[in-house]
Image (cartoon, helix red, strand yellow):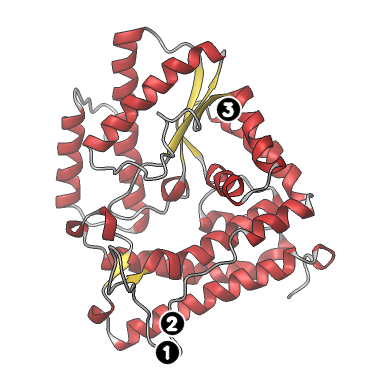
């Protein structure tokens, strides 16, 4: 998007989004650049709307995106996963929650589904002052329930889309430094991601969903991509790496963990191949599912290889972390 381009309504942004998606073909990287441009345009317009109604923004803030957006791993269609960090008094929270509501509305108009889990900036759980965010992160790690650790993992995939990047850095770097030397917490985070949806049956066939919205289809995200995502995130915890994308997390591993970089190639090929299979006309609910009967025999074998590699990746990372004395030794 040209920086000088001005949008007056969310409808203008929606039309621009429709036009560029109709006329362009994307690589995984260019697609995520486009998503960023669209979402930034929505945030900028929401800020203008708020300032016209309630006056100037009362404090420094950062609008953060999480989930696949935070990891820079979105498909053609994406839902909303975001929040706000502001550096100010609690009395300013209402302003930022209203800003969050405006952003949710704008993104919804522009084709981004609302998050089913309500991980959005109009939710008080995801819009807080810097001080209250510090307290919430501590609470999540002090009380290591499955849900708290899930929320913590969502947050650690956050990156700043608009606003003050330092606000997020002030939260992430200290907490990751602490976790990297906290064996108990690392083990709980490992345990939290051990379940992998089975993608291959006992006779070597690709397994499809038996019921629900993806009935008869393969869950590509859960069976193929997530083992890589979770493995790289665990490694990022162990080395206090603040980067969010799976590929960049692997790039930033120190020398004694370079062996794990070998899995980057499979992940990048898998996420690029997903883009060739995606049909946005099927809607967001089916964007992560694949019709296996449209695949060639070779494509099916390739998917099985990616699944096997992802499962091995997670197994090796878990084994390494569960024996911290052996960290850096090939397991």
User: Which mark is drawn over residue 167?
Assistant: 3
For the C terminus, which image quadrant?
bottom right
Reply above or below: 74 against 200.
Answer: above
- Residue position marked by numbered label 2 in the rendering: 200
Can residue 93 be seen in the rendering of this structure?
A: yes
Q: Residue furthest right?
A: 325
- Residue position marked by numbered label 1 in the rendering: 204
Disc 2 versus disc 3: nearer the observer: 2
For residue 86, side relative to residue 240 (left or right): left
For residue 141, side relative to residue 16 (left or right): right
User: Which mark is drawn over residue 79?
Assistant: none
How far is the residue under mark 2 from the one under mark 1? 6 Å
How far is the residue under mark 3 from the one under mark 1? 48 Å
Neighbourhood count class around disc 2 (C-alpha, 10 Å): few under 14, some 14–19, many 20 upward = some
Element under label 2?
A: loop
Neighbourhood count class around disc 1 (C-alpha, 10 Å): few under 14, some 14–19, many 20 upward = few
Residue 68 vs residue 187, the one in the foreground: 187
For the point 33% across and 66% down, the residue is 274
Q: Mark 2–mark 1 contact, CB under 8 Å? A: yes
């Amino acid at each position: 998007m040209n920086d000088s381009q001005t949008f007056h309504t969310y409808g203008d942004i929606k039309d621009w989004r429709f036009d560029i998606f109709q006329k362009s073909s994307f690589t995984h990287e260019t697609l995520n650049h486009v998503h960023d441009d669209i979402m930034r345009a929505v945030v900028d317009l929401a800020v203008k709307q708020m300032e016209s109604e309630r006056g100037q923004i009362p404090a420094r803030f950062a609008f953060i995106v999480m989930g696949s957006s935070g990891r820079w791993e979105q498909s053609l269609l994406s839902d909303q996963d975001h929040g706000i960090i502001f550096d100010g008094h609690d009395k300013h929270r209402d302003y930022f929650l209203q800003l969050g509501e405006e952003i949710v509305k704008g993104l919804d108009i522009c084709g981004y589904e609302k998050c089913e889990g309500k991980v959005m900036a109009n939710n008080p759980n995801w819009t807080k002052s810097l001080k209250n965010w510090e307290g919430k992160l501590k609470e999540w790690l002090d009380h290591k329930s499955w849900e708290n650790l899930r929320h913590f993992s969502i947050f650690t995939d956050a990156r700043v889309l608009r606003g003050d990047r330092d606000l997020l850095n002030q939260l992430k770097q200290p907490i990751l430094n602490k976790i990297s030397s906290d064996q108990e917490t690392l083990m709980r985070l490992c345990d939290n991601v051990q379940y992998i949806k089975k993608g291959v049956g006992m006779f070597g066939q690709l397994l499809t969903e038996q019921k629900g919205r993806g009935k008869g289809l393969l869950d590509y995200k859960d069976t193929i991509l997530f083992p890589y995502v979770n493995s790289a995130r665990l490694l990022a915890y162990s080395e206090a790496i603040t980067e969010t994308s799976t590929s960049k997390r692997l790039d930033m591993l120190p020398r004694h963990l370079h062996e794990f970089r070998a899995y980057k190639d499979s992940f990048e090929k898998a996420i690029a191949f997903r883009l060739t299979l995606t049909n946005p006309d099927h809607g967001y609910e089916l964007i992560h599912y694949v019709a296996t009967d449209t695949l060639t025999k070779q494509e099916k074998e390739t998917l099985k290889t990616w699944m096997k590699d992802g499962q091995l990746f997670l197994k090796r990372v878990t084994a390494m972390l569960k024996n911290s004395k052996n960290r850096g030794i090939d397991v």
